[in-house]
Image: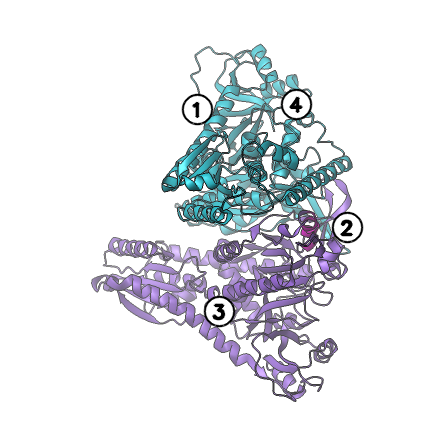
Chain colours: A cyan, B purple
């Protein structure tokens, strides 16, 4: 996603009308109606939590963790009212709000990123920022404003972004002489200065990155994280003397994106190359990591790493004198990942109890909950919880105790399940007596008693295991969605079955456009997702599923976000 | 600075016309003229560097570091063309550009923050972010857009910001139904949600912070870092059940701001309270750290920590139920520091050779430069440089070697002096033979030979010493600027002598307004900077310097940014 944009297909865009139907009832194109809905949900939500709060305060008791748990949960109304498999769109909107990741804002398409979201973003940021610094890429900050002349310099580029550019035309009561655009991406913001700074081969490579907000004023189907009018991202912009260096960096950055998805967010992705139709407009070629959402049967572009070739260099006159004193033109890349990553994580791992956070990105990896009984020594149990947290923190884990005295253990279980904390530790009088703690996994609900003597080692193993299990489960589901289609008939059957389709293709632009036309409909058209770098064998004589011409490659197809 | 704003006096604003004259020739109110100037400087600058580059390449030699140094410097044109004490305004503009901290942008009042700036910002950010996390303050991200209704909710607040709010009125070719503001600060963005999230006393305290860009579309006197239309900052917004808790946090945060200035930027500041005239409009009271720029004789608000009292809570209905079931209203704070900090650092420490960076914020603390001679073993010298860098990096210092072969050592000396690197290490054949390196301090130019056996220890001591020396020197200059004035005559003499004036005051708003009126003129009016927390003794019977009424406190007065 991110920098990907061309005349036909925007970044963060849903193809056609499909998703609107999937999220039927939530997304209404008309803005006012949407706002009304959002307001209603907000009121419902806050009413629900308020009630829960009151109930819990009034009951002022610690029901046993066993039999009463379900009842408490029901009482408090903490459960989600939508199920992931029944109404994915409503489920998603509910889970990001109830899990306290997002708050809907009074300007449609804008969302408040709450601390629970920011902590995930910051963990990924720390990783990525350190990695690019190792690559000698340096952070900078360019203005959020672009003057119209510069914005329009690259024709294909502006064609892609023009409809969604927000324009500042006034300050105070005064009209500006010239309207000023808010950056939808920063190619045109930065490259005039690349032209200025780069004189000779010794000024190369120039490798910059910035962490910032960008604005794309889209009017349809806003979705938290996935498609919003403002989002946070990093955008890297680099210039090299040779194509070989640019090519190398494209793949190095793409590998970092793969690691963010697979190692941090536990989401399997396919690395590959975009088709000519789908590449960044004005660029030479685009690589991406592609994820898949089985529930909606849609691919989702996870992050993109583009080689821009020399096209922008030509438009912005980014020239240099090489070692021999000859004039050359730089080779450029740009690459980005955004807060969209977090939305993909919610969609892939979340369940009917709420969020499920992979341990590596969870700001609370272990929540410790005291389970006091009427005649037990409550203070001793609370102390044991605090000690457990201390031990885990010292060992480098992110653990917290929930010692609030106005909520029942059952309410707390549900609350932290909703928020997706990977591991829960329960400590009651029986656990104290047996020198053990009860450990409950968020991902599969399994419960084990761990001797306190072995606490740190077993928590470490369990967290590692959860991280791997989440990835394995997501991969299994993703793989189960992949279908090979060698003919048009097979392709249509697979598409209707919400599959991610691997098909032999002749690699002709016109054929992709034709497939789009032929599959247009309520759910949106199918298009190429990417041509995977890892190519299965393509026996000689294999024909394109769509054109019947000789196939030159295997390519993933499907509907997409 | 930062959140400080009221009807009369904006954050980041220069009072009156004074500074324009100081920066005469640079700052012309008319935008086009300003742009023209900027363009001219850009061309000059790049031409200069280009020439330097060419010369160095052509000479293709390593002149001796001794006698030829001055000549090389002259040749390359690396020196600044303005002197700090002669033309401060031009000097400042030149040093931030030549030192590669800032690039002027094609929209007036917007600046590109180059990597040399961002590395300083990131070091301060890492410190502050970790400290507020210890205080259980959590990061969030609210939208950059504000709807007009919410923005106007607090009357005094909007009065302060209205003239400089940038408005988005179009997306693509479509007019928005309602214009949307870009945040100048986020009180009105956030507090409707505080109202929603806070129900009972258990939801308190609510302590949030965000790192973001804000926009204030000012039309006069743009200055890099100090006064720009977009800048980066953190803004903290917190709510408490009691005033006592809010009061405590105000001072805790102010202490962090003091540490940023004094411990990181080596700039002495005064902690104090703002007068009623100068406090954040709509707030209860404002505390600040105040720095002073001896060259211009102006105070500069370094950062502000406000107690907002319950005023915003009233406007935004931020209520809660306390332990006894009674309805209460929250007490709020807001606090901010911005990239202005970096401008103050440049102004205080920079000299006629360029930037001077305190070691704690320098991304390169030590630059190692080979000084090869014709018959010496160049490779061995280069290797010694690399080894030195490795040893320093391993010991935790930020060191780099400048091994470029197309620049003379003298050119490199000047270049890294211009960029303000605290320590330079020179390694030549003689140093190699004697198992030593030559170490040159940026702050005072002193040179010592250090035995390589003792490298790490002595570099550590020297860097610590530089950090302290910079602070001491700045403090000495600041202290020398402070003048006590007990009468109006003494006050005027001190003001004309560009002093920071400590005067006994009756603390009446009208008297401050009167002082402003009586001191209006080309250089701008004088006003209160702050009432320092550390109060000298005020003998009974002391009278206000301005009104002749009984004085109640000592207060700092002066012209300011």
Q: Secondary structure at mark 3?
A: helix
Residue that carries the numbered disc 4 in the rendered image: A524
Q: Residue at x 23, y 58 (%)?
A: B376
Numbered mark located on residue B149 in the image: 2
Instruction: Judge if badges 1 and 2 mark residues of a common chain.
Output: no
Examine the image and state in which quarter residue A278 appears: top right
Give the side of residue A376 with respect to residue B161, left or right: left
Does the rendering let one see residue A285?
yes
Determine the chain carrying the residue at label 3.
B
Q: CA distance from mark 2 to mark 4?
A: 38 Å
Q: Position of residue A349 (x, y in %)?
A: 54, 31
Residue where numbered disc 3 is placed: B349
In this view, the residue farthest toward the front is A375
* 1 and 2 marks in contact (CB < 8 Å): no
Please tell me the numbered disc located at residue A534.
1
Magenta stretch: give its range: B187-196
């Amino acid at each position: 996603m991110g920098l990907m944009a061309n005349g036909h297909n925007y970044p963060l865009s849903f193809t056609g009308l499909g998703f609107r139907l999937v999220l039927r009832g939530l997304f209404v194109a008309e803005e006012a109606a949407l706002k009304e809905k959002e307001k209603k949900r907000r009121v419902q939500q806050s009413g629900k939590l308020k009630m829960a709060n009151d109930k819990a305060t009034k009951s002022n008791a610690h029901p046993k963790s066993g039999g009463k748990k379900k009842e408490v949960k029901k009482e408090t109304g903490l459960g989600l009212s939508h199920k992931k498999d029944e109404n994915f769109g409503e489920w998603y909107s509910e889970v990001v709000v109830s899990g306290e990741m997002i708050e809907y804002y009074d300007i449609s398409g804008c969302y408040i990123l709450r601390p629970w979201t920011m902590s995930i973003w910051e963990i990924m940021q720390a990783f990525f920022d350190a990695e690019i610094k190792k690559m000698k890429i340096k952070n900078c900050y360019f203005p959020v404003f672009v003057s119209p002349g510069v914005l329009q310099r690259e024709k294909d580029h502006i064609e892609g972004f023009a409809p969604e550019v927000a324009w500042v035309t006034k300050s105070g009561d005064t009209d500006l002489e010239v309207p000023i655009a808010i950056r939808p991406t920063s190619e045109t913001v930065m490259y005039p200065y690349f032209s200025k700074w780069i004189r000779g081969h010794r000024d190369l490579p120039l490798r910059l990155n910035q962490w910032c907000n960008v604005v794309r004023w889209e009017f349809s189907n806003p979705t938290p994280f996935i498609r919003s009018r403002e989002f946070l991202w990093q955008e890297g912009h680099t210039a090299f003397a040779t194509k070989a260096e640019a090519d190398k960096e494209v793949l190095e950055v793409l590998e970092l994106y793969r690691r963010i998805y697979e190692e941090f967010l536990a989401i399997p992705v396919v690395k590959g190359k975009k088709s000519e139709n789908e590449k960044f407009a004005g660029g030479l070629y685009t690589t991406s990591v592609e994820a898949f959402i089985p529930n909606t049967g849609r691919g989702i572009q996870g992050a993109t790493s583009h080689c821009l070739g020399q096209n922008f260099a030509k438009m912005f006159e980014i020239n240099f004198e090489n070692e021999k004193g000859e004039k050359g033109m730089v080779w450029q890349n740009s690459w980005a990942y955004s807060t969209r990553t977090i939305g993909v994580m919610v969609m892939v791992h979340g369940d009917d109890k709420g969020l499920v956070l992979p341990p590596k990105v969870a700001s609370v990896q272990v929540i410790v909950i005291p389970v006091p009984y009427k005649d037990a020594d409550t203070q001793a149990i609370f102390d044991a919880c605090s000690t457990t947290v201390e031990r885990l923190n010292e060992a480098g884990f992110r653990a917290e105790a929930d010692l609030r005295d106005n909520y029942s253990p059952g309410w707390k279980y549900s609350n932290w399940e909703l928020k997706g904390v990977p591991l829960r530790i329960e400590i009651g009088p029986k656990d104290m007596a047996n020198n053990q703690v009860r450990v409950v996994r968020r991902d599969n609900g399994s419960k084990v008693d761990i001797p306190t003597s072995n606490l740190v080692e077993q928590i470490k193993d369990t967290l590692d295991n959860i991280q791997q299990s989440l990835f394995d489960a997501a991969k299994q589901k993703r793989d189960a969605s992949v279908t090979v289609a060698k003919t048009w008939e097979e392709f249509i059957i697979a598409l209707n079955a919400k599959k991610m389709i691997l098909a032999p293709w002749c690699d002709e632009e016109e054929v992709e456009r034709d497939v789009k036309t032929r599959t247009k409909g309520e759910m949106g058209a199918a298009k190429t997702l990417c041509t995977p770098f890892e190519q299965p064998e393509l026996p000689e004589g294999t024909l394109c599923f769509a054109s019947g011409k000789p196939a030159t490659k295997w390519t993933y197809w499907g509907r997409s976000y």
